[in-house]
Image (cartoon, helix red, strand yellow):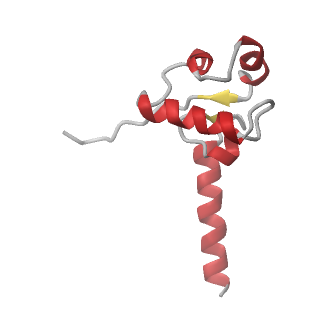
Amino acid sequence: MLKKTLFIVMVLALFSVISYGSEGKIDINTATESELATLPGIGNGIAKKIIEYRVENSGFKSLDELIMVNGIGRKKYKKIKDLVIIMPIKAEVGSG
């Protein structure tokens, strides 16, 4: 039972590192709807739109793209821009 609990804790910690950048910021290319909804002014509705935009555009290339999401204007963007990040995708070594 202890091993199973420890495993679950480790998996949850890993997902936390994936969605939250090294600076404690939320990675908008990997965050879940509930994680995005924790941002100021971003509820579940706008969080869904962020994910839809991310899927349709193969991810965000820059934070400024958040303004392209319906429901996020310049004012809301200014509130959240310091709380989000786009983590670089690590290329696989030796592939190809």
Query: Which residue is outermost to the left?
Result: 96
Q: Using the image, determine if residue 49 lies above or below residue 13.
A: above
Residue nearest the viewer, comparing 70 with 18: 70
| Image x and y of residue 55, in percent | 45, 35
**For residue 51, side relative to residue 71 (left or right):** left
**Could you tell me which residue is drawn at 18 percent across and 39 percent down?**
96
- The answer to which image quadrant residue 68 occupies is top right
Query: Which residue is outermost to the top?
Result: 74
Residue nearest the viewer, comparing 31 with 12: 31
**Could you tell me which residue is drawn at 72 percent across and 38 percent down?**
24
**Could you tell me which residue is drawn at 70 percent across and 15 percent down?**
73
Q: Using the image, determine if residue 4 lies above or below residue 78.
A: below
**For residue 14, side relative to residue 39 (left or right):** left
Name the image quarter holding the N terminus.
Answer: bottom right
| Image x and y of residue 62, in percent | 54, 19
| Image x and y of residue 49, in percent | 59, 33
Q: Using the image, determine if residue 20 lies above or below residue 8.
A: above
**Could you tell me which residue is drawn at 65 percent across and 74 percent down?**
6
- The answer to which image quadrant residue 23 occupies is top right
Give the number of marks. 0
Q: Is residue 21 visible?
A: no
**For residue 32, side relative to residue 39 (left or right):** left
| Image x and y of residue 42, in percent | 74, 33
Q: Is residue 53 visible?
A: yes
Q: Using the image, determine if residue 31 lies above or below residue 62.
A: below
